[in-house]
Amino acid sequence: MSPITLHILGCGSAKPTLNHLPSAQILEMRGKYYMIDCGEGVQTTMQRMKLGMLKVGHIFISHNHGDHVFGLPGLISTMALLGRTAQLHIHGPQELEEFLNIVLKVYCEGIDYEVLFHPVRTREHYIIYEDRSVEVWSIPMNHRVPCAGFLFKEKQALPHIKREMIEAFNIPVSQINNIKAGASWTTEDGTVIPHERLTTPAEAARSYAYCSDTRYTLDVATMIKGVDLLYHEATFPQELLAQAKKTMHSTAHEAALIAKNAEAKKLIIGHYSARIKDESLLLKEAKEVFENTILASERLKMDIF
Amino acid sequence: MSPITLHILGCGSAKPTLNHLPSAQILEMRGKYYMIDCGEGVQTTMQRMKLGMLKVGHIFISHNHGDHVFGLPGLISTMALLGRTAQLHIHGPQELEEFLNIVLKVYCEGIDYEVLFHPVRTREHYIIYEDRSVEVWSIPMNHRVPCAGFLFKEKQALPHIKREMIEAFNIPVSQINNIKAGASWTTEDGTVIPHERLTTPAEAARSYAYCSDTRYTLDVATMIKGVDLLYHEATFPQELLAQAKKTMHSTAHEAALIAKNAEAKKLIIGHYSARIKDESLLLKEAKEVFENTILASERLKMDIF
């Protein structure tokens, strides 16, 4: 089973600091890159992390605030310079389209690839995209502008066929896909070999949830129940709860409550306010509620098991 | 005399590399920052260089290509977060306005300061802006889209008054500005003390020219005659002249020819193509024509004497 890897490109919030870049991530599955948010500077960070820009097929934008989208113009332009011909799909709230259209019209005339925009209905929890490997679900967030997080659910793989059974019963190659899909095998003498004897179960499908930016919303926990890895914004510590409420953000304590209620396997927090001088306090606060928490940081790479 | 300082924030070209950032500079005069071009990532670089964003009053954009403008949305947004109230003036070709308007409309609603756009007539050599310290002249460039370089001409300071003369002739304070401006002084007994005896000449006014992006155009040398420091793009070495012609850029050899014909005091070259692996070859090539040449690099800081 190939790993699913999360690459953190930026985990700061809107006001820039020397410690963090604005929000951007790449989820790597089977050699494909799914980008999540696209803050200014992603190109440079991708180069530093040796993440090829042309491997990005889909970009998922949570909401139309500058610190989540200002990397798009440069990235789209550079992909053209790198000779991209494959379509690029951008999923995000309807509000993003106007900016995107101007960027394409003014700066990308005559590029050799198509950029397709797919509006996300941010108030609904639904499959916004799927391919052979994954379903991507929107997660309604509660922010100052329309905003949706994203849940990546790996599709359940088919069971593995036992090679020794193929040989023992002389099963033809043409039947293997049927058996993987659930069929049994009947030998020439009429004996039925049940599916379960012919196969070993596939590994459990994995999942990743990205929840940013949002005011604490416990409903989210239901939508991401049992998620393997949850990235949740933790812009402020609990002592700045009033500020979190005012700006429609979450505290580290609240991020951990979501993880706990969702029965997530692991939590990673980020989107730190520029006011935070010591992130370890956020970590401590979250761990008091949900032990298996880590801090996001730029260029962090993490496999989701 | 306070120094005029050039800060290089980025000196690469459109295709990003790990060595360079896209074009951006700040010219610092009397505590004011005049920004020239604004490639993606300027905010981070300014923070690293400890250049306060709120000191930027005017931004001069040479042309409407992404690698010269994609830093604007983030910079404008961040200035708002930093509490800016002073007007921000952006000078650039008319083509820039549409993008700027969308950025302001979509991402900057309700900010506490005004952004004013001043179109530059890129085919004319004229004063596009002046204040107490400086005249800024456009320099028509020859690129694929309308493009103008910028010549910053410090205004000639008034001569210094000799303190001992004030005392010797009992000149009242009210007359000092007249004398600085050229007047003589007549003593009570009718003796005329000539202006030249009362003052020492001011230091020569300084100048800086920014020429990027452009195909080699010798006319430029006339417009910037005697300039103290010239930044000229040198995207390619002379052996890639065909490429320079095709993409409307200059070679290092050509940049040096401009400096030589302009009788510049010093040349700084930049806007390196991503194809350039060894910039010292560009330097060598330029020095063969114009010895007093240096290579631009990120975070370089240089006083113009």
Image: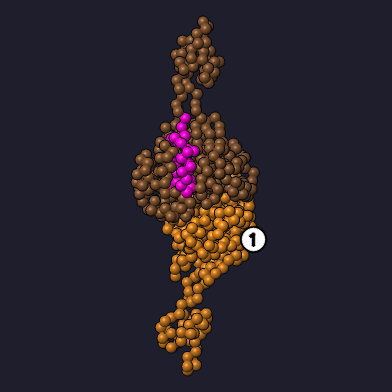
Chain colours: A orange, B brown
Front-most of residues B231 and A182: B231
Classify 10 Å Cα crowding around label 1: few (below 14), some (14-19), many (20 and above). some
Q: Chain of mark 1?
A: A
Above or below: residue A225 compared with residue B145: below
Element class at badge 1: loop
Residue type, mark 1 in image: Arg
User: Height in image: B169 above or below A263?
Assistant: above
Q: Position of residue A199 (x, y in %)?
A: 46, 80
Q: Could you tell me which residue is drawn at 42 percent across and 40 percent down?
A: B261
| Residue A148: x %, y % from top left | 60, 58
Residue under numbered circle 1:
A121
Give x and y (percent) for residue A54: 48, 62
Residue A162 part of the magenta segment: no
Visible residue check, residue B106: yes
Q: Is residue A282 visible?
A: no
Which residue corresponds to the image point at 58% horizontal and 39% vertical from the top-left? B89
Viewer-nearest residue: B82 or A231: B82
Picture residue at 58% right of the left edge, 56% below the top: A104
- Report the magenta residues as a range: B205-234
Residue nearer the viewer, A260 or A23: A23
Q: Residue at x 35, y 49 (%)?
A: B281
